[in-house]
């Protein structure tokens, strides 16, 4: 065995030790971190390794464990540092408004997380936090906004103020009156893939609003021209939320606080769906899976959902099954599943005023869905099971002032102002 082969074998063993078995930047272990940064001393997955290479060797010198050669000096850097020790340096002080990327997270967030760590050095010890504008929860600038009743995107001027507790946007920068004001207490934000918006650097803002005395949910799709700009808006919005929630966060750890700042849909995509009435046909819908509920739309990027199916189930009862339930026309594909309540009565499936298609007299509270492929169906089932096991954001409360906090979270999920 050559010296190079010996070091490769030692590196593979080192990669399997605690901390190094996952990517230092996104935390993925599948695929395994088969790349290293020999000057930083960390193990990386193939995706993050590409982003390190894009930064240039002035910041990170990337090598493949399997394809490149190693010597004693390179091995010692990796052995002495490794992912856990590197995190103590590069992630010494990460602000609560930051949302470190997880496995398979959105590319913009992963890229800016890497840049923030190694180029801008935002989280190292003694970093000057006054230079981080997003921490103020205040920001102004132009973003492209998807038009409500058209496929066009229009440039709009946005103003975020954590002090006023609102995000507003204007058609023109010098307009005296905003087109819309969204309260920070009610806002939620998430990144959206290019596959959905057909635009890079996209984000979705959601908030409830009142229309004809009914509470409805509004979706606003945005995109920017750069990865940095969309992530900066995302972080600024989280900082504004943090400022608003700060009086209610006593006793919560960082993970719990992060869950209160915003949450992403567990899965988004197209499915065919039946109504709950006997004989209802299949219609293609854009579906967003949230915590224990399905939102469905006529088209992707529609501003308001057609329906909001809330499903409650006790931990011991199954409520999702493969196949089709009820009498309906033939499904578009055989890859079907259906959801139902744990008890077959109208109280187990609660739908908002957005739609009243279930639980009426003579209707069965069962909803059928159909995927294009078996793989996609399995992904939806897995996502649904994940949603049913998770706690909703509204259920997380601090140890003190729980009554007021509970009221706060209820208002955050069910109220808004135009």
Image (cartoon, helix red, strand yellow):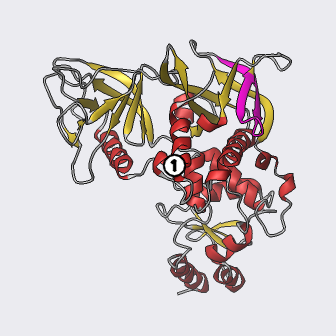
In the rendered view, does 405 fall on the left or right side of 128? left
Neighbourhood count class around disc 1 (C-alpha, 10 Å): few under 14, some 14–19, many 20 upward: few
The one nearer the camera, 153 or 173, is 173
Residue at 62%, 34% (x, y): give it. 202
The image position of residue 208, as x and y in percent, is: 54, 28
For residue 42, above or below residue 233: below
Which stretch did the figure color magenta?
153-169
Residue 96 occupies which quadrant of the picture? bottom right
Q: Is residue 256 magenta?
A: no
Residue 26 visible here: no
Q: Residue at the location (52% across, 53% down)?
A: 402
The secondary structure type at the circle numbered 1 is: helix
Where is residue 407 drawn, in percent x and y?
53, 42
Judge whether residue 157 is colored magenta: yes
Residue under the point 62% across and 52% down = 248
Number of marks: 1
Quarter of the image that includes the C terminus? top right
Question: Within the image, what quadrant is residue 238 found in?
Answer: top right
Q: Nearer the viewer, residue 348 or 103?
A: 348
Q: Is residue 310 left or right of residue 230?
A: left
**Residue found 60% across the figure and 81% down from its top:** 4
Left or right: 380 with respect to 254? left
In this rendering, is residue 285 above or below 165? Answer: above
Residue 280 position in % (x across, y down):
21, 17
Query: What residue would you read off at disc 1?
Result: 403
Where is residue 338? Give x, y as percent: 24, 35
Q: Is residue 290 visible?
A: yes
Magenta-highlighted stretch: main secondary structure?
strand
Image check: 352 left or right of 263?
A: left
Question: Please, is residue 185 above or below residue 131 in the view?
Answer: above
- Residue toward you, 60 or 108: 108
């Amino acid at each position: 065995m050559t010296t190079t082969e010996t070091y490769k074998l030692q590196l593979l063993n080192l990669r399997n030790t605690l901390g190094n078995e996952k990517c230092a930047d996104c935390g993925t272990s599948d695929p395994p971190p088969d790349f290293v940064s020999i000057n930083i001393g960390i193990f990386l997955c193939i995706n993050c390794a590409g982003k390190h290479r894009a930064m240039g060797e002035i910041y990170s010198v990337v090598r493949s464990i399997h394809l490149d050669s190693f010597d004693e000096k390179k091995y010692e850097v990796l052995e002495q540092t490794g992912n856990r020790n590197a995190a103590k340096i590069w992630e010494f002080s990460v602000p609560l408004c930051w949302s470190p990327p997880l496995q398979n997270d959105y590319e913009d967030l992963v890229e800016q997380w890497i840049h923030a760590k190694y180029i801008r050095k935002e989280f190292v010890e003694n970093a000057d936090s006054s230079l981080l504008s997003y921490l103020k929860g205040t920001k102004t600038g132009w973003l492209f906004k998807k038009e409500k009743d058209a496929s066009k995107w229009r440039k709009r001027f946005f103003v975020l103020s954590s002090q006023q507790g609102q995000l507003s946007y204007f058609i023109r920068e010098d307009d005296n009156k905003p087109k819309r004001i969204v309260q920070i207490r009610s806002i939620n934000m998430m990144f959206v893939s290019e596959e959905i918006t057909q635009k890079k650097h996209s984000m979705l803002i959601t908030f409830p609003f009142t229309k004809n005395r009914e509470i409805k949910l509004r979706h606003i799709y945005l995109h920017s021209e750069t990865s940095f700009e969309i992530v900066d808006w995302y972080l600024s919005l989280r900082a504004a939320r943090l400022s608003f929630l700060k009086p209610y966060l006593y006793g919560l750890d960082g993970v719990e606080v992060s869950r209160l700042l915003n949450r992403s849909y567990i899965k988004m995509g197209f499915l065919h769906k039946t109504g709950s009435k006997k004989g209802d046909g299949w219609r293609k819908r854009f579906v967003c899976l949230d915590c224990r509920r399905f939102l469905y739309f006529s088209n992707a990027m529609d501003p308001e959902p057609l329906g909001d199916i809330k499903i409650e189930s006790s931990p011991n009862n199954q409520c999702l099954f493969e196949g089709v339930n009820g009498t309906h026309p033939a499904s578009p594909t055989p890859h079907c599943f259906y959801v139902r309540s744990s008890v077959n009565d109208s109280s187990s499936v609660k739908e908002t005023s957005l739609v009243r298609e279930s639980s009426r007299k003579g209707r069965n509270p069962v909803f059928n869905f159909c995927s294009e492929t078996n793989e996609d169906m399995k992904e939806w089932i897995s996502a649904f099971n994940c949603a049913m096991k998770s706690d909703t954001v509204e259920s997380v409360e601090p140890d003190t002032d729980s009554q007021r906090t509970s009221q706060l979270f209820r208002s955050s999920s069910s109220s808004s102002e135009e």
